[in-house]
Amino acid sequence: MAGVELSHVGKVYHDGTRAVSDLNLHISDGEFLVLVGPSGCGKTTALRMIAGLEEISEGTITIGDRVVNHVPSRDRDVAMVFQSYALYPHLTIRDNIGFGLQLRKMDKKEIQRRVQEAAHILGLSDHLDRKPRNLSGGQRQRVAMGRAIVREPQVFLMDEPLSNLDAKLRVQMRAEVARLQRDLGTTTIYVTHDQTEAMTLGDRVAVMKQGVLQQVAEPQTLYDHPNNIFVAGFIGSPAMNLVMGTFGAIDAEPDTDRVPLRLGSHELLVPRKVFEERPALARYENRPVVVGIRPEDLSDATLVEPGPGEVFRASADLVEAMGSDVVVHLQGDADHVDTDDTRELARDSGRELDVDHEKTIVVARFSPRTTAAEGQTLEVRVDTERLQFFDPETGLAVWDDTENHVGGT
Amino acid sequence: MAVDATGTATGGGAAAAVPPPGTGGRRRQVPWLGLLFLAPALILLGALVLYPIVFSIVRSLFDAGGETFVGLGNYGRMFTDHDTLIALRNNVIWVVVAPTIATALGLIFAVLTERIRWATAFKALIFMPMAVSFLATGVIFRLVYDQDPAKGVANAVVVSVHDLFNKSSEYPGAFPRDKKALPAHDGGYETAKPVAAGTPAMLPLVGFPPAQLPDSATQAKAAEPSSGLSGTVWLDFKPGGGGTSGVIDPGEKGMPGVVVQAVRDGSVVATATTADDGTFHFDSLSGGAYTLLLPQSNFAEPFNGVLWLGPTLVTPAIIASYIWIYAGFAMVLIAAGLASIPRDTLEAARVDGATEWQVFRRVTMPLLSPVLVVVFVTLVINVLKIFDLVYIMAPGSVQAEANVLALQMWLVSFGGGNDFGFGSAIGVFLFLLVIPAMAFNIRRFVGER
């Protein structure tokens, strides 16, 4: 097993299209790193460069302590699980799993033993003599995993391995992948566009957008301290609400210890504590700022005791009862945030054609005890301490001036 | 197919287990309705396909005139008649060689063109002969295989390559003035009487155009008498007439570069080459009892290339022209098969540790084999009925050697044989040969559906 190091890696195709720029990543031995991003963000290209299926245009990739830029795929000692599984249709499951070992001229008995063991781990023992076309999607996926683990490679590379499975099976296989990786302890790089997979599987998660790395961090850090609007909007489901807001004068109401923040026709009061955490926020006095509100930081004001300046009124456009919670789409009048990041996010979620600038929909996640119904005007309480702030020009999170996560490792 | 369809249609009506009284009863009353709709197809198929087949089978059991029933006599004749046996043998060669090579070449082209940028242009070029008829191909390849290197490109290539490594002789066709004094020996010429040192030998040759003598050739002269063995080789022909044969006349030139060997007791003891004036000297040889030999290498006819359309090479030559047409066909089908192999699977094999050759052998080939089999079988069917190429390309003198069954069928029935019984028998035999291949392909297509 070994770590993987990507240093200033870039990919430019023959036609001049740039897929990846200046990618720096360090994946430690035994780590599970998830590369996540919308389609076309270069995450699969990055993985294929590590696998040796794509030429590296710029920078170096190191596996263990060997620079592999010019090492052919077969000699890199990595195993890859493909989205399509890419099983060999003419071979039995046994030969599919043992293919890599046969190529290495390993002893037949040893191959047999390893294949049996892998099949046992994956629950495929009864299917070893069947052909892939006779297996279900989940079983094929397991064969693809088996083919990877039987080789005991230095690194596992997984390219959206679960995206062809139906939702229920995907959750189950996700747990299996996590357990398998934990038991084997093999360094794993996992590509997905599903942020739930990224959050649940990864020791660390790397978010990419248009070939550029946005942030690498542990899942919770990514969630709580997103570097920029893109990461904030991409991580989390339902996604973070992003609206334009304007701060009032910081010292307007010194006795209340709070700073007014206008969101459309509503006004909230933000505790001064937030300004202590984010010193740079003081520069946005009387200036517009992008405000991020997580859906779970909104709650039905009738069920809690709201403090001063925490409540606004809005009508419920749509109420979705999920059982464990109730997702309420609220109609607000704050301005849209229109930056590259939000456009990219909209494209990813298929809302590109949403040009309705009159309404701003704010999604809230209420406790199931709420009595909110569609069409009602609700009192909504905002956890103003947990608001996120971003610069409308650069899209970067507003902390203090020195802190800058972008491109960090 | 048609028989099948009628079977289901009528059978379906009759066998409907417990038909509801209304519809079922009515359907049973008019079973001919189904037949009515099928009639056009049945009549056409019957008249155009079934009747000729049956007629041919029946006809094959009668003699040439069609009056006497001979049973399987015509079939027996097929395996005893010399010409037909050769046709059968050639057909076997065709079926084994042509589809194999065409498929193999198609595979090589398809695999190699997969990775190059101008693949489409290359494929179009290779596929183009498919647009040429067999007749035109035959005409083209008769020219390609022409015996004269000046016309046939095949021999032009062969002759240039041959001459590159093997210089042709200096004086092809030249022969002695006096065949008694200088009789033929092993393709060359050897003096009949021994020559002795001190007396220059005179070796006059004729039968070579003076204009083709090397530019360096000068007036021939007798060798200076000396202690060694010597003599002159010259072209004993005076341009403009006159002169005495066997004597060096003014205007007669020496023949430079002729190899002369001195032979004693049957073995060559020394070799010399004539000078520009035709003289040669063996200064180290003295005494007598030598004979002089002008070896064959001086006079060998120039290499004229291979007799492509001769009795030995005619079948391979025609097969090569067939491959010229059908390699493109094979390539296009195989390339389509290659394109349908998922890239992921090949990449998975590469990551699994396979070299490019292993990927080809262990993944590409097995996944491609159904296509290869279809191409091969299609070509086998095509080759079994090969006729026009052989008919056009094989010159009349070697037609018997190049014969194939389809051509033989035509020859014995229409091409002079006038024996329609025997011709039908060959036709039926060909039909039987094609059936397994057809059945295989049809089953394959049905299976794919």
Image (spheres, coloured by chain):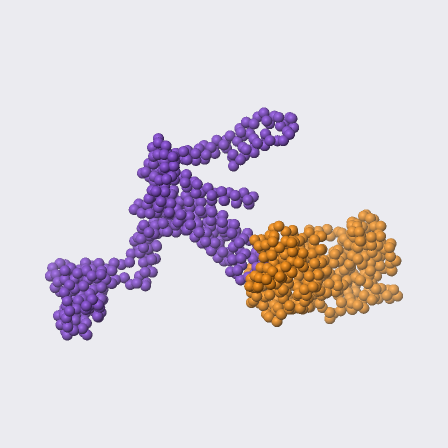
Instruction: Using the rendered view, name the quadrant where residue B66 is placed.
Output: top left
Q: Quadrant of residue B416?
A: top left
The structure residue drawn at horizontal position 43% and vertical position 43%, both measured from the top left corner, is B433
Q: Is residue A252 left or right of residue B272?
A: right
- Give coordinates of residue B251: x percent, y percent: 15, 64
Task: Please state the horizontal and vertical placement of residue B141, each as a whole percent of the image.
Answer: 36, 50
- The residue closer to the viewer here, B360 or B93, is B93
Residue in front for this viewpoint, B226 or B155? B226
Q: Is residue B105 above or below residue B55?
A: below
Colour assignment, chain A: orange
Q: Judge whether A45 appears above or below B387 on screen.
A: below
Residue at position x 56%, y 62% from top?
A103
Front residue of B66 and B136: B66
**Residue found 18% across the figure and 66% down from its top:** B292
Circle count = 0
Please indicate whether residue A187 sits to the left or right of residue B169 in the image.
right
Tell me which chain appears purple. B
Rendering coords of residue A305 (x, y %): 88, 58
Task: Give the x, y percent position of residue A152.
Answer: 63, 64
Q: Is residue A206 visible?
A: no
Residue at left offset 63%, top offset 66%: A154
| Quadrant (top left/top right/bottom left/bottom right) for the C terminus of chain B | top right
Say whether residue B92 is visible: yes
